[in-house]
Amino acid sequence: MSNYLELARKALLVCPCCGCTVASEAGPDDGIPSEDLAEFVFACGAAVAVRDGYLFPIFSCDDVMRTALQEIDREIEDQRFDEGLDDPDVEEEENAFSEVSFEIEVEQSNYLNDVMDRAKALGLVENEACSRMDLLATHANGNPMDFKRLSEADDFNLTHDFCGIARHINRVTGKLENHFSPRFSKRGGKHGAC
């Protein structure tokens, strides 16, 4: 077995794009292309092939684009700062952040804790505060969740909603994007819908 594969296995414990955990690893006996030593598929749907000496992306998640755009945005802001230019969008962004709600009913809060415990046990949580805020923002900003039913869901459906919310939430508005509908939403999300 290649030393490179062992090092790659240690480095690819989570998705390089979004931090989701590895869902499966395939080797040569699993029918992967002959030039690949292994393929890692992550819970978010991203996949990486390990070839001797380098990593090759097979599928990437939406966070790749978001991360790339954020990096470009930081570079632009750094350049504007270096040139002494004011940023007219700062006040608007600060106001948008102040409008995101994180309110939740006490009863739902208890079930949210159960959801977080299950998600941690499944290895879905990289940053507990961020994950909790994503769920709260979803619930309080136009897509109320049934955290009781979600806490009782099987692992597959809990993973669908938990990772889907993390992947599709707009953290400026608190709203879900890309037509994602959690299965355990109170507002018409149905168990089994996407």
Image: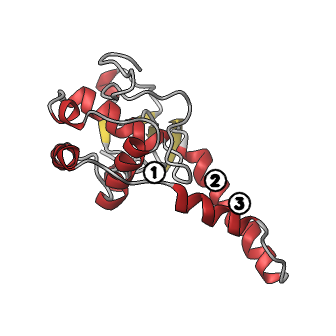
The local secondary structure at tag 1 comes to loop
Can you see residue 51?
Answer: no
Q: How far apart are marks 1 and 3 (CA)?
A: 18 Å
- Of marks 2 and 1, which one's residue comes earlier in the chain? 1
The C terminus is located in which quarter? top left
Residues tagged 2 and 3 counted as in contact (Cβ below 8 A)? yes
Give, as a three-letter code, the residue at label 3. Ile
Q: What amino acid is found at the position of numbered circle 1 in the picture? A: Pro
User: Mark 1 = which residue?
Assistant: 16
Q: In which quarter of the image is residue 182?
A: top left
Of circles 1 and 3, the one toward us is 3
User: SS at mark 2?
Assistant: helix
Secondary structure beneath label 3: helix
- State how the image is colored: secondary structure
Q: Residues within 10 Å of mark 1 (few under 14, many from 20)?
A: some
CB-based contact (under 8 Å), mark 1 and mark 3 = no
The numbered dot on residue 72 is: 3
- Residue 68: image tag: 2
Measured in 3D between alpha carbons, the distance from the residue under mark 2 to the one under mark 1, in whole angstroms, is 12 Å
User: Picture coordinates of residue 47 (x, y %)?
Assistant: 45, 36
Q: How crowded is mark 3: few (under 14 residues within 10 Å), some or many (20 or more)?
A: few
- Is 53 located above or below residue 37 in the figure? below
